[in-house]
Amino acid sequence: MPHTGEWKVRLHLFEDGGTTKARAVIDTGTRELTGHGVAHRNPADTDVPEIGDELAAGRAMQDLGRQLVEIAERDIEGTGATGPGPRPAVGWPA
């Protein structure tokens, strides 16, 4: 059965005094999740805001990914799905 979907992600970045914070919000249509990430610049390093943005945003997206995988794993368990041996840590069995 074919299925298509589109999930919207909003990424908010805040920088203050060498610390960049990111908040990533995903709307799946049935729920909204928020991931958080932080990056700290060493005071001795050159101030390159894009690097802080990349690190904080990447960490916020990793947080969202972790949450989505945890939800999927609970949903899989809720269906009563079982398989031979342990289930892979991420994704569906091949």
Image (spheres, helix red, strand yellow):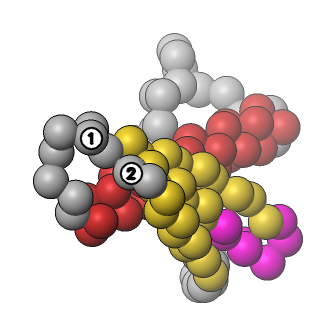
- How far across and down, in percent of the image, does residue 25 sit? 66, 67
Q: Which mark is residue 43?
A: 1
The secondary element bearing badge 1 is classed as: loop
- Residue 67 vertical position relative to residue 74 in the rendered view, above or below: below
Tell me if residue 26 is in the magenta stretch: yes
Q: Does the magenta segment cover residue 84?
A: no
Say which quarter of the image contains residue 20.
bottom left
- Graded by Cα atoms within 10 Å as few (under 14), some (14 to 19) or many (20 or more), the crowding at tag 2 reads some
Tell me where residue 26 appears, x and y as whole percent.
66, 69
Q: What is the x, y in percent for residue 52? A: 33, 56
Q: Is residue 76 visible?
A: no
Q: Quadrant of the N terminus?
A: bottom right
80 sits left or right of 23 in the view: right
Identify the mark at residue 18; answer none if there is no mark. Answer: 2
Question: In the visual, does 49 lie left or right of 93?
Answer: left
Q: Position of residue 5 (x, y in %)?
A: 62, 83
The amino acid type, in three-letter code, at marker 1 is Pro
Amino acid type, mark 2 = Gly
* Residue occupying the point 79% across, 66% down: 32
At 27% from the left edge and 38% from the top edge, which residue is drawn? 42
Near-viewer residue (86 or 74): 74
- In the structure shown, which secondary structural element does the residue marked by tag 2 occupy? loop
Quick one: quadrant of the C terminus?
top left
- Give the residue at x 72% y 74%: 27
Q: Is residue 11 above or below residue 24?
A: below
State the extent of the magenta-drawn residues as a range: 25-31
Q: Of marks 2 and 1, which one's residue comes earlier in the chain? A: 2
**Pointer 2 and pointer 1: residues touching (CB < 8 Å)?**
yes
Cα distance, mark 2 to mark 1? 7 Å
